[in-house]
Image (spheres, helix red, strand yellow):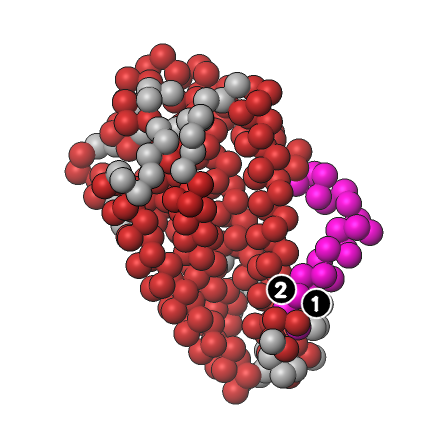
């Protein structure tokens, strides 16, 4: 209970910072609309050709593209969060203080995660609402809500686990500036092989197996089947993808927690987790 209270206090700090400096929130909304809008127009240009490869999703490339881009942006923000949090606390000389408290760095990261999750969810809902009701992006009239929530939550947990693995490299590899290599690699592979921007069917057959090693593939495929085709638990692909994502989420979170804890212990036994003056 005290851990959650501590975590929510960090989330509240992020909320207060946004209230005092709302420009970043406004710019984040604009950025999300701009990114989604850019790919929306690209999808309109490619629609006639790409629709032929999307019979599973009703042959609608515009909906396929917009939904993929919106959910991927959210996942990318969650995955980058742990490293960004540690990086900010380290250079602000707060990390040593957090680590010496009763709940260590974990309450700080958890609080930041809670805030980022809600923050990104609001932006995501806003963009999707605009895309559906203003732009006219097609979704099924009867979206199965429970499968959609399940896919979304598993996707978030997987990205959080990957983010924790990446954050451990702040100390393990001494990556204290720039982009961290693990999440960078996951991000690049996802952009190329998970079908965010184009159907997986256009990839050469010999490398399509790479797509099945990336959890984003199962998440985006499942979310699109639910939102565009209206498939629920009765669909075999939906059930299988959810099961695979459950396994991914457990493995990524366990590995993330273990690697991050070991990295903190290693740093603490060395020069400490703060800046050595």
Give the structural element (helix, strand or loop) at label 1: helix
Q: Which mark is residue 9?
A: 1
277 or 243, which lies in front?
A: 243
Q: Is residue 194 visible?
A: no
205 or 219, which lies in front?
A: 219
Farthest-out residue, bottom: 269
Q: Is residue 11 one of those drawn in magenta? A: yes
Asked if labels 2 and 1 touch by Cβ distance under 8 angstroms, the answer is yes
Does residue 125 appear left or right of residue 137 in this picture? right
Residue placed under numbered mark 2 in the picture = 111
Farthest-out residue, top: 48
Which quarter shows the N terminus? bottom right
Residue 77 screen position, x and y as percent: 54, 49
How far apart are the two marked residues, 1 and 2, measured between alpha carbons? 7 Å
Residue 210 screen position, x and y as percent: 25, 45
Q: Residue at x 41, y 65 (%)?
A: 253
Q: Quadrant of residue 246?
A: bottom left
Q: Is residue 86 above or below residue 243?
A: below
Mark before the other along the chain sequence, 1 or 2:
1
Q: Is residue 86 one of those drawn in magenta? A: no
Give the structural element (helix, strand or loop) at label 2: helix
């Amino acid at each position: 209970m005290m851990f959650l209270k501590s975590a929510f206090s960090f989330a509240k700090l992020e909320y207060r910072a946004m209230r005092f400096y709302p420009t970043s929130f406004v710019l984040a909304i604009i950025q999300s609309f701009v990114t989604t809008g850019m790919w929306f127009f690209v999808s309109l240009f490619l629609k006639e050709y790409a629709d032929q490869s999307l019979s599973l999703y009703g042959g609608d490339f515009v909906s396929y593209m917009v939904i993929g881009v919106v959910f991927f942006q959210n996942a990318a923000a969650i995955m980058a969060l742990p490293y960004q949090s540690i990086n900010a606390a380290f250079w602000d000389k707060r990390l040593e203080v957090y680590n010496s408290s009763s709940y260590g760095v974990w309450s700080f990261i958890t609080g930041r995660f809670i805030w980022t999750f809600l923050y990104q969810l609001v932006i995501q809902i806003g963009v999707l609402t605009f895309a559906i009701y203003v732009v006219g992006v097609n979704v099924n009239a009867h979206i199965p809500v429970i499968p959609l929530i399940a896919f979304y939550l598993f996707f978030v947990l997987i990205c959080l686990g990957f983010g924790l693995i990446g954050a451990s490299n702040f100390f393990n590899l001494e990556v204290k500036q720039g982009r961290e290599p693990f999440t960078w690699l996951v991000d690049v592979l996802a952009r190329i092989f998970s079908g965010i921007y184009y159907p997986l069917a256009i990839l050469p057959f010999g490398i399509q197996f790479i797509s099945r090693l990336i959890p984003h593939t199962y998440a985006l495929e499942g979310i699109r089947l639910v939102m565009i085709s209206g498939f629920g638990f009765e669909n075999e692909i939906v059930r299988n993808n959810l099961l695979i994502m459950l396994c991914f989420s457990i493995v990524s979170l366990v590995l993330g927690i273990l690697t991050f804890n070991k990295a903190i212990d290693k740093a603490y036994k060395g020069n400490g987790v703060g800046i050595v003056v």
